[in-house]
Amino acid sequence: MFYGVARLRRGLACLCFALMAASAAQAAELTVVQIAPLSGVLASTGQQMVLGGKIYFDWVNDNGGIHGAKIRHVVQDDGYKVDETVRLTREALQKPEVIALFGFAGTANVAKLLSDGVLETGGAPLVAPYTGGEALRKPFNPYIFHVRAGYADEAEHMVNQVVTLGMTRIAVMYQDDAFGKAGLAGVEEATARRGLKLVAAAPYERNTDQVHGAVRSIATADAQAVIMISVNRSTAAFAKQYRAAGGGAQLFNISVVDPAELVKLAGVQAVHGLGISQVVPYPYMANKPAVREYQTLLQKYGQGQAPNYTSFEEFLGAKVLVEGLRRAGPNPTRARLIQALETLNNFDLGGTRVSFSPANRVGSRYVEVTVIGASGKLLR
């Protein structure tokens, strides 16, 4: 009898050990997939997007993870190509260990995930996409948690500044896709509210820097201000060619460009004075706790990279995702993570806040305009 009890105890101990081991294995990793443009015209932006998430995830992992689980940050390159974004996302969401999507780029890319039902079928949240397209915000969809203001918010802010300076002849240079058209619509609405019409709206082809047609059109229109809805290479090409053609309008661009990259590509003379709307606080001055934290972790984990608006935006996005994972508890599901993210109401990221709810997925509407100075540095 004693022998039988001993065997039973040993069996129960083995079973408990096996269950504990299975639970530990289950909690060992939380897989987060980031699909970003690491090649093509948006490669430098994609690299900064990945960096911002990486430095925070690395810090979380070095400090015990989340409920004992480490974050596995899987990064894949879509080359800013819509079909690649869709293919890679489908593949990722077929893997049950993937708990969340993080930091994708491109209005057209993410819009295709919505129209094809990829996010709905997969059921995982996409946190902090690098896009302000209104089509991703209206109508409401439950799967995307936006950390940034929308392009309509940016357009309103820039048009207001232009009109305040007494300029009424406004032109737009825009990428001929969902991204560019979303920004164009925002500018058209903002000017219409003030009784104005654009003097020119000039497109350029996506994934190129072939902007000579837009330069001719806008130079002919004699604009006083040009608002660009474009990425680094096309913005730099336009500024350089437009200035060389004698164009003297005040230039603006929405937040998706990197001022250091613009200076590198076009030269400081061409982009001096260019205004850039921003959707997160100034990352170069450590006057907020989030900026100090970002700069510290960038030094530790960033392999010598300098502060940058893009990496700071995705750093804040990573903080949002991590807090959602923490609130979702051990071994979270995709659905529980969505519910947890919805509870981040007026959540303080360190001097800047986001608010989500079951009926709201736009976490912030913060916008300010910065300017590239004579030295090539970005000024507030």
Image (cartoon, helix red, strand yellow):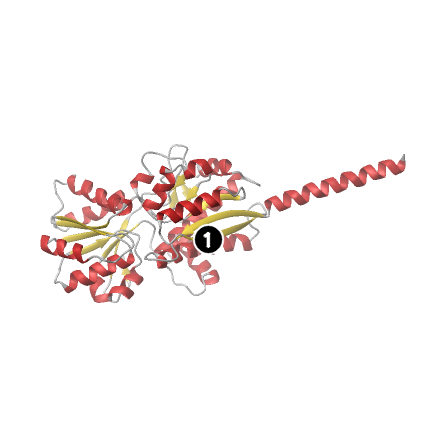
The answer to whether residue 272 is visible is: no
Label 1 crowding class (10 Å Cα cut-off): few <14, some 14-19, many 20+?
Answer: some
Q: Position of residue 126 (x, y in %)?
A: 42, 43
Q: Is residue 186 left or right of residue 107?
A: left
Q: Is residue 34 above or below residue 135?
A: below
- Residue at mark 1: 75
Identify which amino acid the numbered label 1 is placed on. Answer: Val
Q: Position of residue 331 (x, y in %)?
A: 57, 41
Q: Is residue 332 above or below residue 53?
A: above
Q: Residue furthest right?
A: 1
Q: Residue furthest top?
A: 359
Q: Is residue 14 left or right of residue 61?
A: right
Q: Residue at x 89, y 36 (%)?
A: 2
Q: Quadrant of the C terminus?
A: bottom left
Q: Position of residue 87 (x, y in %)?
A: 42, 46
Q: Position of residue 355 (x, y in %)?
A: 39, 39
The answer to whether residue 265 is visible is: yes
| Of residues 10 and 366, the one drawn nearer to the viewer in this rendering | 10
